[in-house]
Image: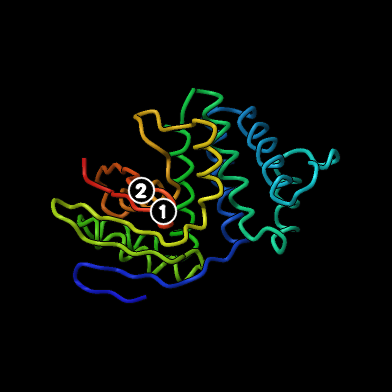
């Protein structure tokens, strides 16, 4: 990872199984908002998505989040981005429950990022250390690399506490393509983005300020979006 006063360039590859486990923690937390039906729906949609990526029929003997997770982890060599199955499941389940992504997606992202910071042992030392968005994301990228959740990313400091994020080969775009193809969008309008919503959550945890995000370009072949103070 290389840094300058106005740019952060991350060059790293994430650990697929780590992403799966963080996704599971986020799903279980979001289920507290929607109830057991949310977990059942995520499991069903994730299983179907995973089986399609593996070019096979969904196994009839697999039910429930734990079994679906085991199925995904077992097949990570065949489909290394198996965590996308769970992310897709979250997006589709929330859209089916309330018509679009919103509170559930944000809660999932917040809990996943909080878990990453907690597992790094740096949650308390990072929280409240800066009010600056760029600095907050800089701190997180150092932590993310240590816990194997970092991926290729370019962050550019903008004016008025805004950061542009460029992802050359987003590890989550399989799930994004699927929800976009199904017409699933954010409650406030625009497309959902796993990278933006998770980094938005980090920024709020570290700075204790409110931010929002906007996906400006998807898979062309890079993705580009912004996080900004509200």
How far apart are the alpha carbons under marks 1 and 2? 7 Å
* Rendered image: mark on residue 65: none
As drawn, 180 above or below 68? above
Query: Where's the C terminus, which quadrant?
Result: top left
Position of residue 58 measured from the top left corner of the image (x, y, whole percent): 79, 41
Q: Which residue is mark 1?
A: 220
Provide residue 136's location: percent of width, then percent of height: 28, 60
Q: Which residue is mark 2?
A: 217
Q: Quick one: which residue is furthest to the left in this view?
A: 160
Q: Which one is in front in this view, the residue at disc 1 or the one at disc 2?
A: 1
Q: Residues within 10 Å of mark 1 (few under 14, many from 20)?
A: few
Q: Give the SS element for disc 2.
A: strand
User: Residue 212 at x, y = what percent?
Assistant: 29, 41
106 versus 118 height, above or below:
above
As displayed, is residue 165 above or below residue 34?
below
Q: Residue furthest right?
A: 61
């Amino acid at each position: 990872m290389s840094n300058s006063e106005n740019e952060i360039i991350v060059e790293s590859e994430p650990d697929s199984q780590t992403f799966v486990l963080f996704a599971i923690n986020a799903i279980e937390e979001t289920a507290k908002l929607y109830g057991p039906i949310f977990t059942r729906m995520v499991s069903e949609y994730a299983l179907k998505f995973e089986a399609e990526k593996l070019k096979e029929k969904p196994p009839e003997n697999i039910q429930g989040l734990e079994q679906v997770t085991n199925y995904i982890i077992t097949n990570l060599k065949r489909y290394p981005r198996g965590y996308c199955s769970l992310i897709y499941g979250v997006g589709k389940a929330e859209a089916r429950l309330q018509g679009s992504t919103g509170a559930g997606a944000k809660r999932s992202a917040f809990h996943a990022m909080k878990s990453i910071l907690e597992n790094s042992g740096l949650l308390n030392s990072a929280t409240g250390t800066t009010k600056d968005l760029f600095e907050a994301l800089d701190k997180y990228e150092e932590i993310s690399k240590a816990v194997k959740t970092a991926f290729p990313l370019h962050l550019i400091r903008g004016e008025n506490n805004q950061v542009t994020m460029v992802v050359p080969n987003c590890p989550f775009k399989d799930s994004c393509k699927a929800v976009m193809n199904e017409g699933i969008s954010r409650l406030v309008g625009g497309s959902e983005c796993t990278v933006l919503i998770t980094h938005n959550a980090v920024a709020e945890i570290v700075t204790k300020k409110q931010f929002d995000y906007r996906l400006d370009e998807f898979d062309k072949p890079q993705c580009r979006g912004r996080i900004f103070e509200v």
